[in-house]
Image (spheres, rainbow, N blue to C red):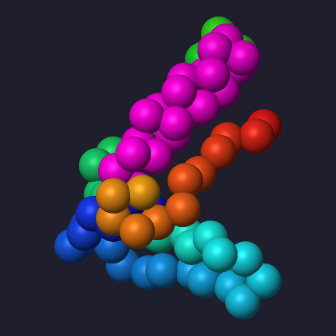
Amino acid sequence: MSGTEFPATEAVLSTEFSDSDVYYEWRDEGYVSDSDWSDVDVDALLEQYRDATKASNEERSANGFKPMHVTG
């Protein structure tokens, strides 16, 4: 989504109803348990997603892509 190439990308999903694409990448790196999910501060996690997405918008724009915004 930033114009950066990822050679391990296996698929790209696009739709005519949106200008968004979804990229899928397989990584055979093991299993991550979700048994501690109840310990996660979901509001803080969402804020981290918002901040990281906002921070990468400059690179997206420089590569000719529209900025992304996390809304919820």
Q: Write down the quadrant of residue 55 in the picture.
A: top left
Left or right of 40, for residue 53: left
Q: Which residue is nearer to you in this view: 70 or 67? A: 67
Position above or below: 46 against 38: below
Q: Which residue is nearer to you in this view: 66 or 17? A: 66
Where's the C terminus, which quadrant?
A: top right
How far across and down, in percent of the image, does residue 54 sit?
Answer: 52, 36
How far across and down, in percent of the image, does residue 1 sit?
Answer: 44, 62
Position above or below: 34 against 44: below
Q: Residue furthest bottom?
A: 16
Image point (73%, 77%), residue name: 18
Image point (64%, 45%), residue name: 69
Q: Which residue is nearer to you in this view: 30 or 25? A: 25
19 within the magenta span = no
Left or right of 71, for residue 33: left
Segment colored magenta: 41-60
How far across and down, in percent of the image, does residue 38 sit?
Answer: 71, 15
